[in-house]
Image (spheres, rainbow, N blue to C red):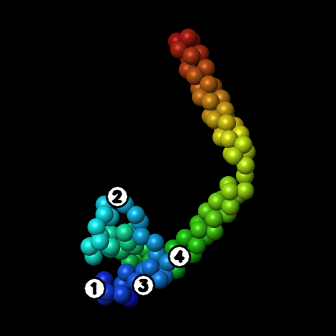
């Protein structure tokens, strides 16, 4: 457990590869601003820091990394084609609903 008043606290966070969240508000070098980038860690409820949650996050990290690698290995044309296919499917569903609504209005 580390004390927030410890002058080495920020150094420990950085050395342990905890990246600060960069915001537009981080525009001066005060001690308060330095900690603000780590608010996402400092505001975690202690009940959320469990082995079960750690394992869940590690699994999500692996899945996300796999998705990233998969996307990086695709050509832009493949991504574009998939987006168009997805859009076409959604438009087809929308069209079916519009036809159904039209028929219901006509029948009533």
Does label 4 or label 1 sit earlier along the sequence?
A: 1
Residue hosting label 3: 12
Helix, strand or loop for disc 1: loop
Helix, strand or loop for disc 3: helix
Q: Does the image show residue 82?
A: no
Between 75 and 106, the one nearer to me in the picture: 75
Helix, strand or loop for disc 4: helix
The correct choice, above or below, for 17 with respect to 2 in the image is above
Helix, strand or loop for disc 2: loop
* Residue 104 horizontal/vertical position (percent): 56, 17
Residue hosting label 1: 5
Callout 4: 10 Å neighbours few (<14), some, many (20+)? few
C-alpha distance separating marks 4 and 2: 30 Å
Q: Nearer the viewer, mark 2 or mark 3?
A: 2
* Residue 91 horizontal/vertical position (percent): 62, 30
Does label 3 or label 1 sit earlier along the sequence?
A: 1
Residue visible at 46% across and 75% down? 18
C-alpha distance separating marks 3 and 4: 20 Å
Does label 2 or label 1 sit earlier along the sequence?
A: 1
The correct choice, above or below, for 29 with respect to 12 in the image is above
Residue hosting label 2: 24
Residue visible at 41% across and 66% down? 21
Q: Is residue 69 left or right of residue 38?
A: right
C-alpha distance separating marks 3 and 1: 13 Å
Residue hosting label 4: 54
Can you name the residue that lies furthest to the front here? 28
Q: Is residue 38 left or right of residue 29?
A: right
Q: Are marks 4 and 2 in contact (CB under 8 Å)?
A: no
């Amino acid at each position: 457990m580390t004390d927030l008043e410890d002058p080495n606290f920020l150094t420990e966070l950085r050395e342990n590869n905890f990246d600060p969240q960069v915001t537009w508000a981080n525009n001066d070098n005060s001690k308060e601003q330095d900690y603000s980038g780590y608010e996402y860690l400092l505001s975690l409820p202690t009940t959320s820091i469990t082995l079960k949650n750690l394992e869940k996050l590690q699994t999500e990290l692996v899945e996300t990394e796999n998705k990233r690698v998969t996307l990086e290995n695709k050509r832009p044309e493949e991504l574009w084609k998939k987006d168009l296919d997805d859009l076409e499917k959604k438009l087809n569903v929308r069209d079916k609903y519009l036809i159904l609504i039209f028929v219901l209005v006509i029948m009533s």
